[in-house]
Image (tube, coloured by chain):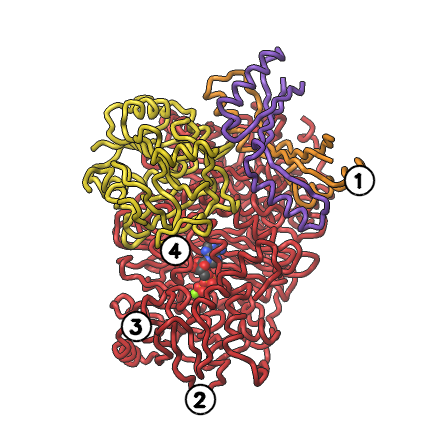
Chain colours: A yellow, B red, C purple, D orange
Amino acid sequence: MKTAITVFPGTNRERDMAAAIEKASGSKPDLIWHGESDLAGYDLIVVPGGFSYGDYLRCGAMAGNSPIMRAVKQQAERGVAVLGVCNGFQVLTETGMLPGVLMRNAGLKFICKMTHIRCERSHAPFTGSLNQGDVIKVAVAHNEGNYFADEDTLDRLEGGGRVVFRYSNAAGLVDATTNLNGSQRNIAGILNESGNVMGMMPHPENAIDALAGGVEGLKMFAGLAGTA
Amino acid sequence: MSLAEVEITPEIVAEHGLTTDEYQIVLNILGRAPNITELGIFSVMWSEHCSYKSSRFWLKTLPTSGPQVIQGPGENAGVIDIGDGDTAVFKIESHNHPSFIEPYQGAATGVGGIMRDVFTMGARPIANLNALRFGDPSHAKTRHLVSGVVAGIGGYGNCMGIPTVGGEVNFDKAYNGNILVNAMTVGLARSDKIFYSKASGIGNPVVYVGSKTGRDGIHGATMASAEFTEDSEEKRPTVQVGDPFTEKLLLEACLELMATDAIVSIQDMGAAGLTSSSVEMADKGGVGIELALDKVPMREEGMTPYELMLSESQERMLMVLKPGREAEAKAIFDKWELDFAVVGRVTDTGNLTLMWHGDLAGEIPVAPLVEASPLYERPWEPTPKAGDVDTSIPADMSMSEALKRLIGSPDLCSRRWIWEQYDHLIGGESVKTPGAADAAIVRLPGQKKALAATTDCTPRYCFAEPETGGAQAVAEAWRNITATGATPLAITNNMNFGNPERPRIMGQFVGCIKGMTAAALALDFPVVSGNVSLYNETNGVAILPTPVIGGVGMIADAALSVGLAIPEAGLSLILIGETKGHLGQSIFMRDLMNRTDGAPPPVDLTAERRNGDCVRQLITGGHVAACHDLSDGGLAVALADMAIAGGVGVTMDAAPSNIALHAWLYGEDQARYLVATKDEAAVLAACEKVGVPAQRVGISFGTALTLPGGDTISVEDLAHTHDAPLPNYMAGASWSA
Amino acid sequence: MKANVTVTLKRGVLDPQGKAIGHALEGLGFDGIGEVRQGKLIEVELAETDRKAAQAKLDEMCRKLLANTVIEDYAIEIVE
Amino acid sequence: MKANVTVTLKRGVLDPQGKAIGHALEGLGFDGIGEVRQGKLIEVELAETDRKAAQAKLDEMCRKLLANTVIEDYAIEIVE
Ligand SMILES: Nc1ncnc2c1ncn2[C@@H]1O[C@H](COP(=O)(O)OP(=O)(O)O)[C@@H](O)[C@H]1O
Ligand SMILES: [Mg+2]
């Protein structure tokens, strides 16, 4: 299993992501600098979290225009699995690879906390050993995670089974009280139409260690690594 | 060039904050009148902020050595040995005045500055902390300041990708016009890869990297050394705007270059920018430095040598490279899209020589500039001894109501609203996050061992009895680290005080230093770095003396560390340390009885040491399920904290008959801990063996906290009372306890 | 040539920031405050001297980078 | 009455956002880009019908909340 993790100026969770993937798969991902334009030969491409270009102007906007994202797009069109987490999700929406946008949190504040997300459908390879209805405890850390799309788009997402995660409580309840950032329909993660690109705001990569953050994120990575 | 011809009048000298005597020294050093650029350099170098002229004499009395100390005060940050070739590099820094004027940017650039201090030493930052003091919650500005400062700290640290894992916040009207924003960073370096600022190698290139220089914060250093008046808010932008994105690139670029052996020395440009960095580098190496100021990357047109030397633009560094390594270094900075310019060279003249398009723009002998820097042994008056306080209370006062009021009060309510705005999880090594333990625990990547870090100070104790307060601040930091199971190793400190020219204020400073010294010696907890912020006054009203202590410790196996949450029912709660029921200067007396007189609890350093060493052994020996030190609010508040965090109730045993119930519950005697344990007998026996007072005070049980006598509050009610006030207040509500 | 580009949220897209500003203004005692919305102003200096060419270029900049047309509208004003 | 308030960083104050936008535009192949600066646009609806009174009110809002005059300038334009 060969994984590429893209790195932009300002990316800052690439090491966390690499550690998670290495822990699950046993193989070290390659960190790929944003100026590269060739991503051939990878089974998985991850656009990790951080503040690419300082989150200036709009989160993900500048990274979305970089050479490496053209390569990511090409590979995605060939069917390679692409995962965007947090800033990576923002980048993927900016490139149009995923619909909608991530707006400023409804509470207007950065939110860092452990939260629960409910898996809405099991979808290889992204959800690993998770089944529909399973709840995992993971971290969020973002200022712009408020998922927005027009109603038609949302209906299309739902209809196509493309909503993968929603913010919930430990019991799997999904409602306004468990919606921590104002996202439409509590959406925390979605798929593209062909199902090989997923974006999510929470950080499963920070839930891979019993002492720090817990291990529930590993359930997801188990699938990515094909070791479920 | 008009500035060159500026005539140096007595007014101009005064505007630069130099006294007549100080100016005379300038004349003696130069043997002539300075030009304006040179005057500016003397002015910032001899400002309180850079020269420590009021505090140096006393700072020198602090204990700074120990087998663990690799680098004490004097470099960008202190360095301690944490075994296996690893070191912890840390320091604390204030950004008080700028944060009052522009809270977001002031706090943000404070965080940026302290991180630069740490990575200049070759360390990758792994943890940020911050100690904050705001005015009365009902003061018109407080809410806006809290909101801006917290957002600014988060904004910078989150973007840098360094977890912010701890800190403290107090509210007191003494800070209405002068808030405190102290930021601390802890980093990791290998002991053979530590970088220092000492310039050497005649002819070696001096290189400027980072952001371009603008007219930011010119005279920022002198601002930080002058009292506030009403109209200082109107002054020209002396506040800088931070660019955490650029600093993140600067961090990565510097660490990448540091992995080679191209660097001779490196110094960040903090307060007084290019001036203090070049002077310090030259002075430490006993060499001269020649700078071609026209080569400095500039953001604005028409900048003068004066402005270039005094600018406090952020996100910049100065380095001396080995000869011939420029291209290699430049390639790294190009990759990270940062400016890189060879701006000068090391010389054998011992002078700071400034060139401007080939002409001499100023020349100052470095050694006299540094050595003649004024040193004042300011007159000081000891703080009068506090008397006894009447600690009686109304006969019908409800102890559970008192507890609810206290845990929902500004100083004791949950800080969740704050730390949820800080990314405290990035890095995946945050073993104990904010609210989970008395000190933050951050593991070393790929290792079992972890660092513990905390910041502490109880300003009301320092105000009442500076010496006790200074000792208490150090002891509390030591205790907070101990309560996690870690071994305290060393401290950094931030001395925040009023105007040192007032003997009473100077007396507070001296008292706190004496207390800190005694405690640091008794606890083997030496000072390895620090910062002084004086003149924290507005219209003649000084802040409370606030010597913030940042403590760092280590635990060999992070898995052995404990938090404060009671994990389950059926555990015994053991109070360790002696309880006399000291109420003077307690939160209880201040907030519920409106009494702020009396002496603070005495600090018995022998007991601190003995009790703490005992607790640490119990924890690392696996006998303890949770531990919390007792501080503000005493036993009842500590129990409530532990119950709320664990979501488990506690039924307290009967109170001792020789102490009033409110003194038992709310007294603030020092050197105490609460531990939750399955092995009550083992814990009591271990304490007895080393002569440490210990007694069971209750057991964990059910879903409510039951005070002695049966007074009961549900943990849910407690949690709500604790959690709601700060978010409500920040949403615009007046303070509701 | 200098231009001001303003980027505002589309009508219908919730603007919590604008709302918070409105609230804060009311909190400060200002009355009669209706809707408040917050957008961005981007000032760009261009070497281009032809107005029409500049307009076209700015339009492209907006579509490619400055605005996210899923939620934002933009307006270009050439000032000199 | 409706007003547009623009809040911009004072000349000389670092504008990291503007700098980064300028870079990004160049990266996209736009040439001849000079300085780029980013500010805020705040649209306010006011019940006030008197232009002069509105202007005074807006000025106070700017000084009290919308801008920090230590680092920012503001401009008020009444649009209708
Ligand atoms: N400014 C802050 N930044 C980050 N964490 C904070 C801050 N203030 C308080 N905390 C965290 O909140 C928790 C409780 O703080 P405090 O009441 O000051 O602790 P203590 O009881 O040890 O004195 C601690 O974990 C502390 O690190
Ligand atoms: Mg404590």
Check the residue under mark 4 and report the chain it is in: B
In 3D space, how far apart are the residues under numbered discs 2 and 3 (Cα atoms)? Answer: 25 Å
> From the viewer's perspective, is residue A66 above or below residue B446?
above
In this figure, which residue is indicated by the disc labeled 4? B433
Nearest to the observer: residue B379 or residue B263:
B263
- Residue type marked 4: Thr
**Residue B656: where, in percent of width, then height?**
42, 86
**Residue B381: where, in percent of width, then height?**
62, 69
Nearest to the observer: residue B484 or residue B116:
B484
- Mark 4 nearby-residue class (10 Å; few <14, some 14–19, many ≥20): many
- Residue type marked 3: Thr
Discs 2 and 3 share one subunit? yes
Residue B657: mark in rendering:
2
Q: Determine the image quadrant of residue C16.
A: top right
Q: Is mark 4 within 8 Å of ligand 1?
A: yes
The tag earlier along the polypeptide, 2 or 4, is 4
Q: Is mark 2 within 8 Å of ligand 2?
A: no
The tag earlier along the polypeptide, 2 or 3, is 2
In this figure, which residue is indicated by the disc labeled 1? D53
Residue B677: mark in rendering:
3
Left or right: where B230 falls relative to C71: right
Nearest to the observer: residue B393 or residue B652:
B652
Check the residue under mark 2 and report the chain it is in: B
In 3D space, how far apart are the residues under numbered discs 2 and 4 (Cα atoms)? Answer: 38 Å
